[in-house]
Image (spheres, rainbow, N blue to C red):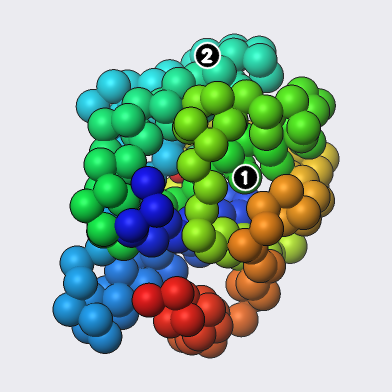
Amino acid sequence: MTKGIFIVLDGPDGCGKTTQATRLVRKIQERTGHHPMHLRDPGGTHAGEKIRAILLDPELNLSTGMEVFLFMASRAQLVEQILAPALLEGKVVVCERWISSTIAYQGVAGGFGADKVAEIGKHATGGLVPDLLLVLDVPQEVATTRMQRSKDRIERKGKDYHGLVREGFSATLKLFPKSALIDATRQEEAVGDDIWARVEKLL
Ligand code: TMP
């Protein structure tokens, strides 16, 4: 699975990862002529999108364990159906979120345990590790002002939980050798330039 390049953008809700992932995909296309694949996790497959709907449904009450295994189930399908074949073909893949999110949200904030999540993640993904994981870091006050739409089930978990998520992401970086924290409080363009400077070296 090493022919392509697997880039993950992750971070707390409201960190701006969708904006930056879209921007990065466009930039890679402009600079290299290569059309990167843009994926989101959870989701990205027909079955994965259905699991995503369950995970984010505010009417459901899911245990942390159920969350862990549903996020991993969606990810296992994404790897087998889309990600592994794309990387084998030599594609560049930009993915929003990854096991790093399950470590920060369910592992640390939810109390499931970061190491346990990382171990389950290895089995769910066949040990696929990003060539680069960039965590966009923002304090909650900034993130909240950026989120103007109605909140999903996990976004509704409250201040304490989301404070731990941010800490969880810092812990996550230690588990991924090729990773970095990006200051995402800056203007969109400055964050984009920082991301590009790191990605350019891989291409
Ligand atoms: P998204 O809207 O940023 O794609 O993410 C959906 C929500 O799911 C978001 O609140 C973060 C949360 N999430 C987890 O709690 N654990 C995970 O493993 C992933 C991938 C997302």
**Residue 126 at x, y percent in the picture:** 48, 31
Residue 19 higher or lower than 67, as above or below: below
Quadrant housing the C terminus? bottom left
**Residue 9 at x, y percent in the picture:** 50, 59
Amino acid type at image mark 2: Leu
**Residue drawn at x 62%, y 62% as measured from the top left:** 178
Residue for badge 1? 100
**Residue drawn at x 53%, y 62% as measured from the top left:** 132
Quadrant of residue 101 within the rendered picture? top right
Q: Residue 112 got which mark?
A: none
Determine if residue 141 is in view.
no
Left or right of residue 161: residue 130: left
**Residue drawn at x 43%, y 31% as measured from the top left:** 75
Q: Specify which label sits upstream in the sequence, 1 or 2.
A: 2
Residue 9 higher or lower than 191, as above or below: above
**Residue 46 at x, y percent in the picture:** 23, 27
**Residue 198 at x, y percent in the picture:** 53, 79
Q: Give the distance between the C-alpha atoms of the residues marked 1 and 2, in whole angstroms.
A: 24 Å
Q: Total of numbered circles in the picture?
A: 2
Which residue is at the front of the view, 66 or 119?
Answer: 119
Residue for badge 2? 60
Local crowd size for mark 1, using a 10 Å CA cut-off: few (<14), some (14–19), many (≥20): many
Residue 148 higher or lower than 127, as above or below: below
Q: Is mark 2 within 8 Å of ligand 1?
A: no
- Under circle 1, the secondary element is helix
